[in-house]
Image (cartoon, grey):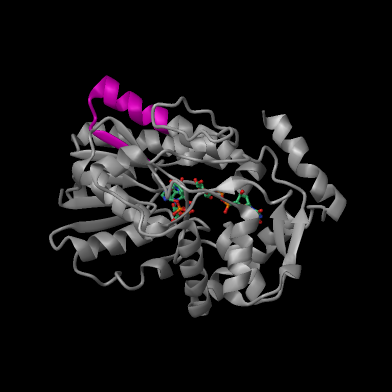
Amino acid sequence: MKNILVTGGAGFIGSNFVRYMIQKYESYHLIVFDKLTYAGNLDNLRDVFDHPRFAFVRGDICDAQAVEDVIRQYNVDTIVNFAAETHVDRSIMNPGAFVHTDVIGTYTLLEAARAFGLERYHQVSTDEVYGHVEGERRARESDPVAPRSPYSASKAGADLLVNAYFVTYGVPVTITRGANNVGPYQHLEKVVPLFTTNALQDRPLPVYGDGRQKRDYHYVLDHCEAIDLVLHKGRVGEVYNVGTGQEIENLQMVEIILDELGKPRSLIQHVEDRAGHDRRYAMDISKIRALGWEPRHTPEEAIRKTVRWYVENEWWWRKVRDAEFEAYYRAQYGRRRVLAPDEVAGLSPREESAEA
Ligand code: NAD
Ligand code: DAU
């Protein structure tokens, strides 16, 4: 492994992965291939941009010719695919973009991996492909996928294609399924950066429904270490879950943010829920543990560290929180009804029994 094509490397996790890999491996070349959608941001890469082992190419993973050209030009031997449309709320507003990039884009990259006989194709997937996980159970890699949003359905479709290319054509693939990442350079549409920057501006924090949904918030560099390990020690054809293995309620996440910032609970505003909102994600991480990986942060540590990064990096988030973002914010949140306290109190039992 020498020349790694990092598709979607100008986004949140991809840019952290590039920084991590370039520092760790002295002989590796990292080539970022990114369309620079609204989520792509060259500021995320500014400290590696002039590195002699770094290159940036603007391009679309759905464009087969552009993918072939970059593979040839940089003698690429490995693809790590982060490129995707990634925000669940946007997938509810505009599902077509998700099917196109997340499914067709993955297919295009797999075809290139097959044609060029690459050493490895790694797919960065998500715990959302398992859908809502009941009770105390934890999703295992052998579980069937059961996605429930256009985003997770597109990601699950991509995972199935990746597996098909392994079984049918022998393409050496691996898949990691990550939980909710938090950390530096995450776009403000995602909950922790959104709530942190709202709270910093004394704006309300729009909590969906009763806020008792459970998520496994884990630190982005822990995720990058896991991908690195799977690239070097993972078995081809296999899927690995990556997270802390501990989930917390969204309201706990909100309280951690407010406490870290010294802001009042009165900023919490319960609003109409996300359509089809998965109540609980929870993964069993014993398979990647057996490879020799451990998360270094608990969800609380990961959230606190992330909040501090946003406090210290206002230069970064002020640029992201631009007029286009505020227009998105109005479209996404302007139509959501604020819930009365008795409506919030009535939500938990009814929703939980509906899921059962
Ligand atoms: P992000 O939205 O921050 O970044 C996505 C990047 O992909 C952007 O730079 C964007 O410009 C690029 N991109 C989008 N469409 C493209 C296309 N057609 N061609 C080339 N580039 C394109 O996303 P993220 O949060 O960093 O997520 C990265 C990957 O990890 C995604 O595949 C996502 O599904 C997966 N994932 C994310 C999380 C999470 O919590 N953020 C958890 C598990 C898995
Ligand atoms: O679980 C992994 C997934 O995590 C990734 O695959 C996705 O790419 C990533 O976007 C993320 O998806 P979520 O939908 O879980 O993340 P989001 O930050 O949008 O929401 C986290 C939780 O917070 C979720 O239960 C919805 C809730 N939420 C979110 C927003 C944006 C709110 O209550 N209010 C909000 O305004």
Along the line of sight, which residue is nearer the eye, 164 or 355?
A: 355
- Residue 102, compared with residue 266, is above or below; it is above
How many tags in the picture? 0
The main secondary structure of the magenta stretch is: helix
Question: On the picture, is 245 further left or further right than 204?
Answer: left
- Image quarter hosting the C terminus: top right
Give coordinates of residue 14: x percent, y percent: 37, 56
Question: On the picture, is 214 further left or further right than 264?
Answer: left
Along the line of sight, which residue is nearer the eye, 92 or 186?
A: 186
Q: Quadrant of residue 193?
A: bottom right
Give coordinates of residue 49: x percent, y percent: 30, 69
- Res. 33 visible in picture: no
Which residue is at 68% across, 60% downward?
329
Q: Residue lying at the far top in this picture: please name it.
A: 168
- Res. 349 visible in picture: yes
Q: Which residues are magenta?
A: 159-176
Q: Is residue 342 magenta?
A: no
Question: On the picture, is 337 further left or further right than 21?
Answer: right
